Image (cartoon, rainbow, N blue to C red):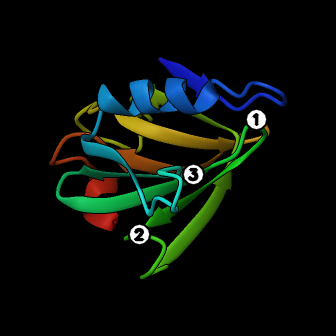
Amino acid sequence: MRWETKQGDYNSCDRLEEFMRKYADGVEWVRKDEHDYSRMLGFKILDRYYEICWYNNLCNLFVGGIKDRPLQATFTAIYTDTCFPICSNGNDNLTFEYKGNPILRIPLKAGSLSGKEL
């Protein structure tokens, strides 16, 4: 599965939410303004909290949420892969990509080598 940003695609936030609901827990729009609007999509994977700041041409991932900001990564696409041979047991991961280059992987199941590194 794959989700991509696309200039002028103002429905991509709905597609992003739908995509993330397949792989993460507690997916919801957070930090809403006075008009009940938010660009921040919060979620958990393996009990770790993340937030995505959505724009139609690029997004930012905050590991731990925007307030903690331990890690921030700008990306243009998300897809699932097994990242073999990095993950010895073939567990699926969410891979975040910036303009065709993988920049970050989040394990979806406990026990992968990348999960121990996070």
Using the image, determine if residue 21 lies above or below residue 110. Answer: above
> Mark 1 = which residue?
100
Residue at horizontal 54%, vertical 21%?
2
Residue designated by label 2: 65
Q: Residues within 10 Å of mark 2 (few under 14, many from 20)?
A: many
Cα distance in 3D space between marks 3 and 1: 23 Å
Q: Give percent across and percent down for residue 71.
A: 51, 73
Residue type (three-letter) at the residue carrying disc 2? Gly
Q: Earlier in the sequence, mark 3 or mark 1?
A: 3
Which numbered mark, 1 or 2, is in the foreground of this view?
2
The residue that appears at 41% across and 44% down in the rendered structure is 86
Return the disc, 1 or 2, that comes first in the chain's sequence: 2
Quadrant of the rendered image containing residue 6? top right
Gap between marks 1 and 2, in whole Å?
25 Å
Q: How many marks?
A: 3
- Residue 107 appears in view: yes
Reading the image, the residue beneath label 3 is 39
